[in-house]
Image (cartoon, helix red, strand yellow):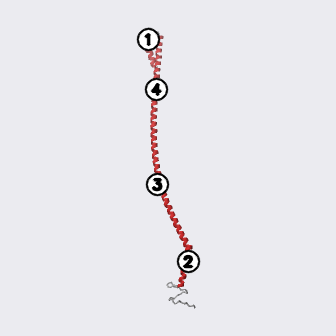
Amino acid sequence: MQRLVVAPHFKQKTMFLITFPPLSPDPGQFIWTTAIFLFVLIFLGRTAFKPIVNGLKKRENDIQEALDAAEKAKAEMANLQAENEKLLQEAREERTKIINEAKQAGENIVNDARNKAKSEANQIVESAQREIENQKKSAIEEVKKEVGAMAIGIAEQVLRENLKGKADQEALVNKLVQNMNQN
C-alpha cells in the first residue's frame, strides 16, 4: 500500500491523494497561480474583454443615436403638428372667406334677378298697356266703322223708301236701329 506523506506544515489528514491548503498556500503555488491568472486575464482582456467593451460602447452609441433620433423625430412631430394646426386654421379662414363670398354672390344674384324681374314686369305692364291702348283704339275704330256702316245703311234705306212723312221716317229709323242692336 502506498503511504501518503504529509508535509510538516500540514496538520490535517487527507482522504484523497491530493491536498488543497486554502489558508496556507505554498509560495511556488502562489506565484504560478498569480502568473496563470495574469496570463488568463491579459489573454481574455485582448481576446474577450476588448470586443465586449467595444460592443458595449457600440451599443451605447447606438442607443444614444436612437435616443437622439427619437428626440429629433419628436421635435419634427411637434413642428409638423404646429404646421398642421396653422394649415388647419388657414383652411378654416379660407372656408369662412369662401362662404362669405358665396353668400354675397348669392345675394347679388338674388338682387340682380329681382331687379331684372321688376324691369321685365314693368316692360310687360307697359307692353300690355300699349296693347290695351291699341286694342281700345282698334275697337273704337271698329265701332266707328260699324256706326258709319250703320248710318250709311240707314241712310241708304231711308233714301230708298221715299217716304213723305216725318213720322214714317222716324219709325223706319227706330226699326232699323232695333234690328242693328239685335245683330
| Res. 25 mark | none
Please state, as top left, top right, bottom left or bottom right, where the N terminus lies in the image: bottom right
Q: Amino acid at mark 3?
A: Ala
Residue pointed to by mark 2: 40
Do residues under tags 4 and 2 come within 8 Å of each other at their CB atoms? no
Q: Residues within 10 Å of mark 1 (few under 14, many from 20)?
A: some
- Going from N to C along the chain, the mark reached first, 3 or 4, is 3
Q: Nearer the viewer, residue 60 or 27?
A: 27
Q: In the rendered view, would you say 59 is above or below 179?
A: below
Secondary element type, mark 3? helix
- Going from N to C along the chain, the mark reached first, 1 or 2, is 2
Residue 75 rendering spot, x and y as whole percentages: 48, 58
Residue 157 rendering spot, x and y as whole percentages: 47, 13
- CA separation, marks 1 and 3? 113 Å
Do residues under tags 1 and 4 come within 8 Å of each other at their CB atoms? no
- Say whether residue 43 is left or right of residue 113: right
What residue is shown at x 52% (from left), y 68% (from top)? 57
| Res. 169 mark | 1
Q: Amino acid at mark 4?
A: Arg
